[in-house]
Image (tube, helix red, strand yellow):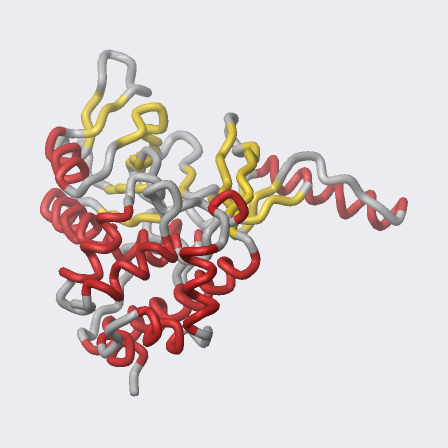
Amino acid sequence: MSSLNSLKLTRRLSDLAKLLRFKPAALSYILFKQPPATKYRVFEIPKRKGGTRTIKAPAEALKLVQQRLSDLLQDCLDEINQAKNRRDRIAHGFKRKRSIITNARQHRNRRYVFNIDLENFFPSINFGRVRGYFTQDISFNLDKDVATVIAQIACHENGLPQGSPCSPVISNLIAHILDIHLVRLASAVGCTYSRYADDLTFSTNKKTFPPEIAEPAGTDAHFWRPGMELQKIITRSGFQINSAKTRMQYRTSRQEVTGLIVNKRINVRHEYRHTVRSMVHSLLTKGSFEVYASTETAGKVTK
């Protein structure tokens, strides 16, 4: 039986526990009896462009439950896409066979590249949205009790925690309706749209950038604001724009999408290449090297 059909047939916590390869008593203990203070470890990590990001790392037992739920939902999503003959090229973050490269490739060699971020992306997806999605979405249409348990596994302090293995796949499922509306808007005005987690990118070769998506905020060509139509769609979909991370990038300057240069061919920043060359040279000549800055890869930070 397929993963999706098996999930749709579950009716209670014990059914879902077995599907996640857990004993019902063990899952019940993790969700309802384990002291809340021991479920997550909260800490800050530096962002590449300044500031910090709050990470809520689940305890090992809860992390294993969330990882298995993530795998199950990824399998269900693959089945849904296959049944609908949907190639799903819009979202690229935390998805099988997708990466920052496949995302950046959509916007290579364009006259304009416009980028915005969604504010508090994971925390804005609360318990009610998660539960409601799995009961109301036509592809899942799960039993209310099962949807409630899924939300209890996934959420912490009434939101998806950044650090949970199942937050990415659930956020992609819930943000898919936003993606559909935005790709329709982009297509109607001659743009390409893609999303990597909370990072939204629009690009075009048109001589004038469509005002429905973005327009100049004043006389300074470097300051742009999201267009009214774009703002309406994002707000109606239950998200908010992070106004501090809105930028228009022109062909005459360096255009960057999810950390990769997209002006002519996909490439990394020259500063990164210089740093790596220095590290390799040090390793070959001295037998060791230093990491000069924090590096974030696949949600893990090394120094």
**Residue 96, percent from left and from top:** 41, 66
Question: Quadrant where the N terminus lies?
Answer: bottom left
| Vertical comparison of 200 with 82: above or below | above
- Tell me, yes or no, if residue 108 can be seen here: no
Residue situated in front as seen by the camera: 230 or 175: 175
Query: On screen, 285 above or below 23?
Result: above
Spot occupied by residue 199 in the image (x, y as percentages of width and height)? 35, 41
Res 121 → quadrant: top left
* Residue sitting at the far bottom: 1
Residue 48 percent across, percent down from the top left: 54, 33
Residue pictured at 49% horizontal, 36% vertical: 54
User: How many discs mark residues in the rendered view?
Assistant: 0
Question: Which x, y percent locates residue 278?
Answer: 75, 40
Residue at the right extreme?
A: 286
Q: Identify the residue shown where x is 45% and y is 76%.
A: 21
Residue 188 visible from this viewpoint: yes
| Front residue (pair 97, 159) | 159
Q: Left or right? Give the position of 104 relative to 203.
A: right
* Left or right, residue 219 beside residue 106: left
At x 49%, y 34%, the residue is: 53
Q: Residue at x 32, y 76 (%)?
A: 15
- Tell whether 33 sits left or right of 159: right
Q: Nearer the viewer, residue 203 or 52?
A: 52
* Image quarter hosting the C terminus: top right
Q: In which quarter of the view is residue 237 placed?
A: top left
